[in-house]
Amino acid sequence: MRLAVLGLLLSSAALPQTLEVTTHTLSNGMKVIIHEDHDIPNAALYFFFKVGSRNEHPGATGVSHFFEHMMFNGAKKYGPKQFDIQMEKAGGHNNAYTSRDVTVYTDWFPSNALELMFDMEADRIRDLSFDPKIIESERGVVYSERRASVENDNAGLLDEQLNAAAYTAHPYGWPVVGWASDIEAWTMDDLRQHFRMGYAPNNCVLVATGDIRPDQVIALAKKYLEPIPRQEPPPPVRTREPEQMGERRVVVTKEAQLPMQLLSFHVPNSASPEYWPLRMLANVLAAGRSSRLYRRLVDRDQIALEVGGGIDVSLDPGQFQFFVQPRAGVDPAKTEAALIEEVERVRNGGIMPAELDKAKNQLLAAHYRQLKTIGGKANLLGQYEVFFGDYRKLLTADQEIAKVTAPQVQEAAKRYLGARNRTIATLIPEKAEGTK
C-alpha cells in the first residue's frame, strides 16, 4: 500500500520535512514498513519480534533474552559466527535488544549488501540451529550476564527486587534476563516452543530505511522471507495487574559504598492518551540538571549525588520510576522525604508555564534527533507501529506533544503518583567481613 507523503514540521520557522513511507504485508503475515533516504549509500533493517519477557511463564523466564544470543550462533546456511563475519565483510554492523515486550534485531550496512542481509536474516529466522553444545555454551553466557548485571550490580539487583514487589500478578514482575533457577532449567522443548511462536513471521514487523527502493525491498522480502511459514503467535497476555492498595517497601542489605533508592508508580501503557502528559511530568521532575528534583536534592539540599526518572514504552500498564543516589552519610529517609515532597508539590500546585514549555522543547528535540539518522527512523517507525498501534502516529507526535496542557500534567501526577500506588526499594550498605 503506497501512502501519501506525510509532513513533519521541525519548528514554526522551519520548512516541513517529509517522511515518505510504503507498507506491504507478506502472505505469511509479516508487515514491512519502508522509508527511502538517499542522503548516504547506507541502509538499515530493524526486525521487531513481538515477544519479550511478558510472553514467558514461570519456570522458563529469560528465554526471550536467550534467543537474542542464539540468533548469532548459526543456522542452516550461515553457520556459527558467520552472521557477524559476513556482516563485517560487507562493511556493516548489527546489534539486538530484548525488553519486556519485544526482541529487536538491528542491521546497518552499505545498501549494496541489501540482498545478503535478507538472505542471512531469513536463514536464522527459518532454520536457527538448536545444537545442544551451543545451547549449553550460551546458557553459561547468559548466566554470566545475569551475575554481572544483577547479582554483582547493586542497581540491577535493586531494580529486580523493586519489580518483584511492584507486580504481584503481571509478568512484568520478573526479570528480562530470567531468574537464575530458570536459566539453569530450560529444556529443549521450552526453547523450541518459544522460538516457534515468538519468531513467527506473522509476529514480526520489519522496518527498512535508507538508500533503498520500496519495490526492491518488497521483492527481496517476498523472495527470502515470504516462504517462511506463519505460526501461532504468542497467546494474549490476559493477566492484568490489580490496583495497588497501599505503599509497598523492599529493603536490600548488601555490601556497597553508598545507599541507593528506587521509587516506582504504576502508570498506563504507551497507547494511553495520558502517555504524553506523563512524559512531560517526568521531564519536569527528573530530566537533567534544571529539573525540580536535581535542583532540590543535588544543588540546594546537597543530599544526593544523582537523581533521575522517567517512563518507558510498554504494551501493558508500566512504571514511572525515580532513582536516587544519596550522598555518603545521608540517611536514605531524608532523600526519600525530599523526593516525595517535590512530587506532592506538583500534585497539589501543578507546574509553571515555563516548565511545560521546556519539557515540550526537550521532548521535541529528542524526537527530531532520532529522525536525523536512518537507524533512528527505523527504530521509531517500529516502536510506533508496535507500542502505539500505528507507525503513522510518529508523524503526529509533535502535534500530540504541543497539545499537552499544564492541568493535564498535574492531573496525571494526582492520579498516578500517590502513596497507595507507590513501591519503594532501598539498598542499605553492609560492611564487608573484616572491615571496621
Image (cartoon, helix red, strand yellow):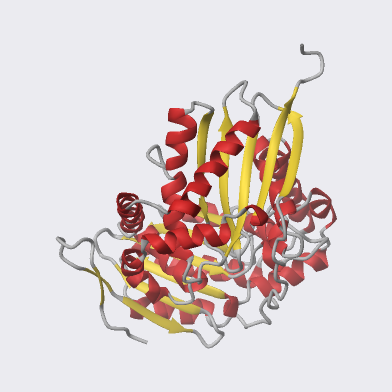
* Residue at 47 percent of width and 30 percent of height: 298
* Residue at 50 percent of width and 71 percent of height: 271
- Give coordinates of residue 228: x percent, y percent: 59, 80
Q: Residue furthest front?
A: 348
Determine the image quadrant of residue 131: bottom right
* Residue at 53 percent of width and 65 percent of height: 120
* Residue at 52 percent of width and 48 percent of height: 344
Lateral position of residue 329 relative to residue 308, left or right: right
- Give coordinates of residue 358: x percent, y percent: 32, 50
Task: Look at the image and tell me whether residue 238 can be seen.
Answer: yes
Lateral position of residue 116 relative to residue 257, left or right: left
For this rendering, which residue is in front, 387 or 87? 387
For this rendering, which residue is in front, 98 or 420? 420
Determine the image quadrant of residue 171: bottom right
**In the figure, 339 relative to 246: above or below?**
above
Instruction: Quadrant for the N terminus, please.
Output: bottom left
How many numbered marks are there?
0
For this rendering, which residue is in front, 313 or 55? 313
- Give coordinates of residue 105: x percent, y percent: 53, 61
**In the figure, 87 relative to 387: above or below?**
above
**In the figure, 152 relative to 43: above or below?**
above
- Give coordinates of residue 306: x percent, y percent: 51, 33
For this rendering, which residue is in front, 218 or 290? 290
Instruction: Quadrant for the C terminus, please.
Output: top right
